[in-house]
Image (cartoon, rainbow, N blue to C red):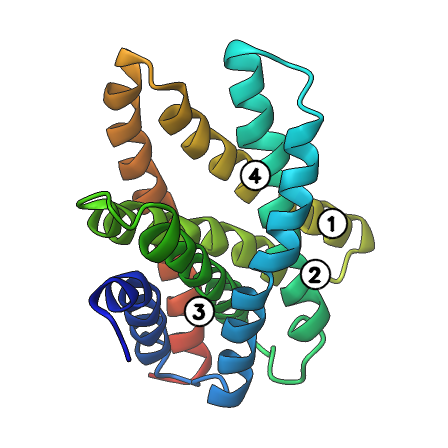
């Protein structure tokens, strides 16, 4: 039976995925491909969690350095690397990837599948008795995964359609390093629990939304122009 905690855990990722799908109305991607990417992102949580647990066992640092290691090397690098690998393996060379907006759509669907599985782990199991964890994650954490993915997809699309091999290589690197840095800063602010963190966190979230909506809007307008609307 579909319990209330499970609904709270699943709803944000599904709602955002549906919103992104409906917004891409100039040339929607095949639903079958998007569902596949969402499912692969969901399943990718398992190897990600295994690798992260291994790395946590070998964290050589203490204090803020330990938090930085967890934020950037463990969560930031491993999660963004695996999400990016899914896009590269299952969508990057697809014939359906024929305009720049597609890269963002694919990366977002993988990320939201990942975030949904992660949300179930937190809301239904790890913090089942903690009030408001589902609301907090639905408003902050799940959308953050989407925003990191917009940055990832932005650079994957630049790489996809670049005719310059050197530039292509630069964009491919940035499709990992940029979301990694954003993810790492996001986690570091939250995990550090410093008093100043709250005052830094809100501007950072605003920055994430503004910069990534600009990227999304640029590719959306590109798609609009390509299809003569």
For the residue carrying disc 3, how many other residues have a C-alpha within 10 Å: few (<14), some (14-19), or many (20+)? Answer: some
* In front of the other: 215 or 15: 15
* In front of the other: 81 or 171: 81
Question: Disc 2 or 4, which lies upstream in sequence?
Answer: 4
Question: Disc 2 or 3, which lies upstream in sequence?
Answer: 2
- What percent of the width, then of the height, locates residue 137? 29, 48
Residue labelled with disc 3: 222
Cα–Cα gap, marks 2 and 4:
26 Å
* In front of the other: 136 or 206: 136
Q: Are marks 1 and 4 in contact (CB under 8 Å)?
A: no
Is 5 on the left or on the right of 183, as rendered? Answer: left
Residue drawn at x 28%, y 13% is 196
Q: Is residue 130 visible?
A: yes
Residue lying furthest right: 165
Residue labelled with disc 4: 76
- For residue 217, what is the image quadrant? bottom left
Residue drawn at x 25%, y 52% is 134
Q: Which mark is residue 167?
A: 1
């Amino acid at each position: 039976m579909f319990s209330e905690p499970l609904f709270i855990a699943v709803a944000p990722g599904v709602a955002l995925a549906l919103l992104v799908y409906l917004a891409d109305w100039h040339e929607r991607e095949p639903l079958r491909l998007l569902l596949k990417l969402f499912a692969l992102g969901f399943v990718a949580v398992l190897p990600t969690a295994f690798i992260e647990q291994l790395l946590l066992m070998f964290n050589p640092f203490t204090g803020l350095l330990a938090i930085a290691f967890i934020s950037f090397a463990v969560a930031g690098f491993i999660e963004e690397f695996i999400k990016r690998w899914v896009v590269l393996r299952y969508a990057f060379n697809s014939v359906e990837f024929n305009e720049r907006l597609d890269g963002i759509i694919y990366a977002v669907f993988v990320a939201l599948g990942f975030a949904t599985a992660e949300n179930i782990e937190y809301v239904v199991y790890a913090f089942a008795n903690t009030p408001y964890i589902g609301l907090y994650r639905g408003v902050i954490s799940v959308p953050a995964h989407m925003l990191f993915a917009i940055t990832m997809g932005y650079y994957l699309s630049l790489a996809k359609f670049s005719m310059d091999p050197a530039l292509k290589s630069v964009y491919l690197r940035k499709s990992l390093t940029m979301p990694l840095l954003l993810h790492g800063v996001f986690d570091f602010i939250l995990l550090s629990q410093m008093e100043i963190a709250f005052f830094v966190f809100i501007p950072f979230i605003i920055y994430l939304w503004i910069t990534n909506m600009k990227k999304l809007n640029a590719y959306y307008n590109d798609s609009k122009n390509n299809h003569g609307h």
